[in-house]
Amino acid sequence: MRRISLILLIIIPLIVGLMLMSGTVLGQDNVFQTNTPRPVEVNFATNTPAGPTETPTLTLTSSVTPSATPTHTDTPTPTFTPTPTFTPTDTPTPTPTPIGPFSYPEGINPLTGLPYPNEEAMARRNLIVKISNFPPIVRPQSGVNQADVVYEFEAEGGVTRFAAIFRSNAPDHVGSVRSARLSDTQLIVMYNALLAYSGTSEPIQRIILAAEWVYQTFSPLKGDGCEDAGFCRFPQDGLALEHTLFLDTNKLWDLATRRNVNTGYRARGFAFNETADAGGLPANDIFIDWYGQTDARWQFDTVTGRYLRYTDGVAHFDAADGQQLWADNLIIIEVPHNERPDLFPAGSNYQSLEIALWDQGRAYLIRDGQVYQGYWRRRDLEPGSALQVIYGDNTPMMMKPGRTWVEVVRGFGDVAISEQRQDMVATATAIALSATPTLTITPGPSPTENPNS
């Protein structure tokens, strides 16, 4: 009897310990509750996803009302209190062989999962161009639909700006080009890219000039002009000077070649598969609100299989091709936004917004009319280690080969995903009846020689 008691004293603690380590606890009514899996650091040894595993997905209502006030996060890793509710379901491995996230076939662009259109595209370096999105007079912008990837960030106070990454295409008229922000110092490393911008604040410029990648940056602020770098102004009556700068990407890539920085490095992180993952929920209408200052609505077009963009209730077009802005994939990531007044002299009224694109956070992947919930991760801080989207077991989320928009928000309370489409024709009609006419940007007959004039 004494021997049995000793055995029980040894075995029972071991069983309890194993239950706790597995994340499984006994809850009320004797029901086993399993913690939602989160990404853990792992050495990816293969591009083939693991077999069926429990992966957090989301349960959507017909619509989710965005909050007018953003949720601020004080730490780099957000607290996972999901809304909508996430429930674990099995996500089986897609059948076709995926592309990426760290190994890509020869001739495949890691930004799109598609073949480079020509040798020139494969040889040149990723190019980030900062493009204005506010005030509304800057719309429609030019050349955005030719970017492989577009990041939309909050610049300040709910006003957003685009960081468009070009590789496949080389448009000769992109813009209007605007200033760099603190977040761009992360993107240039993530995508091992060149950066084109109009100017920036003194603290951010000091960071750029002190960085080891300073020779990958191009700006009129650094003396890069129209003839040598492609930064040209197209004046227009009634249009403020800061909205008249456009970029010829061909000239900038040529200048980068002359400066010996136009090497065609790859940026790894995205994974692609023509076949969508299982377990998605309908997502035909996606609305993002940057607390009343800027908004974006994306609607799934069943004819083209793309998502089409509306801004401030009306269709958002590209002035260069006349098409509505579109994407094959939407990635929405929840990222801490930190105020950085410390970059400016003490007592000043200025500050920079630091968008913490490191560590990990929650993410939605939206493709083919379906939404999937997982996490974003920046695997490390090395050049070319770009954004990943993964499930809780570290399995890559499979994106559709094509173009991607990455929408960066403070919290998912600012995002509404619905199966039902908003009637945008009725919305645009109501806006047109009440709106004051605004100026539409069109390029002038010829650029001025001095981009700083």
Image: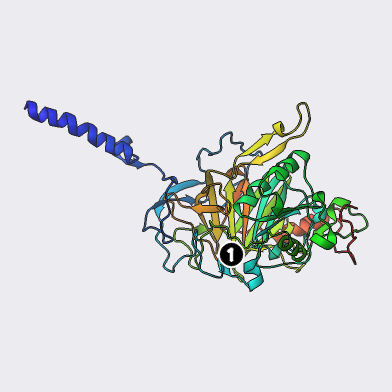
Of 178 and 276, which appears nearest the observer? 178
Look at 50% across and 59% down and name the residue there. 101
Q: Amino acid at mark 1?
A: Thr
Look at 71% across and 34% down and name the residue there. 343
Of 164 and 441, which appears nearest the observer? 164
Please count the marks in the image.
1
Q: Which residue is mark 1?
A: 112
- Please, which residue is most extreme toward the left here? 1
The percent position of residue 191, horizontal first and vertical second, equals: 61, 55
**Left or right of 367: which side holds 321?**
right
The percent position of residue 72, horizontal first and vertical second, equals: 61, 36
Look at 90% across and 60% down and name the residue there. 448
Residue 262, placed above or below residue 26 = below
The percent position of residue 274, horizontal first and vertical second, equals: 50, 68
Give neighbour class at mark 1: few <14, some 14-19, many 20+ (Cα, 10 Å): many
Q: Could you say which quadrant of the image residue 238 lies in?
A: bottom right
* Residue 270 visible, this angle: yes
Secondary element at tag 1? loop
Residue 70, placed above or below residue 61 = above
* Residue 441 visible, this angle: no
Image quadrant in which the N terminus is located = top left
- Please, which residue is most extreme toward the right here? 237
Residue 169, placed above or below residue 366 = below
**Left or right of 29: which side holds 150?**
right
Of 304 and 77, which appears nearest the observer? 77
**Left or right of 124: which side holds 440?**
right
Q: Could you say which quadrant of the image residue 339 lies in?
A: top right
The percent position of residue 405, horizontal first and vertical second, equals: 63, 57
The colour scheme of the drawn protein is rainbow
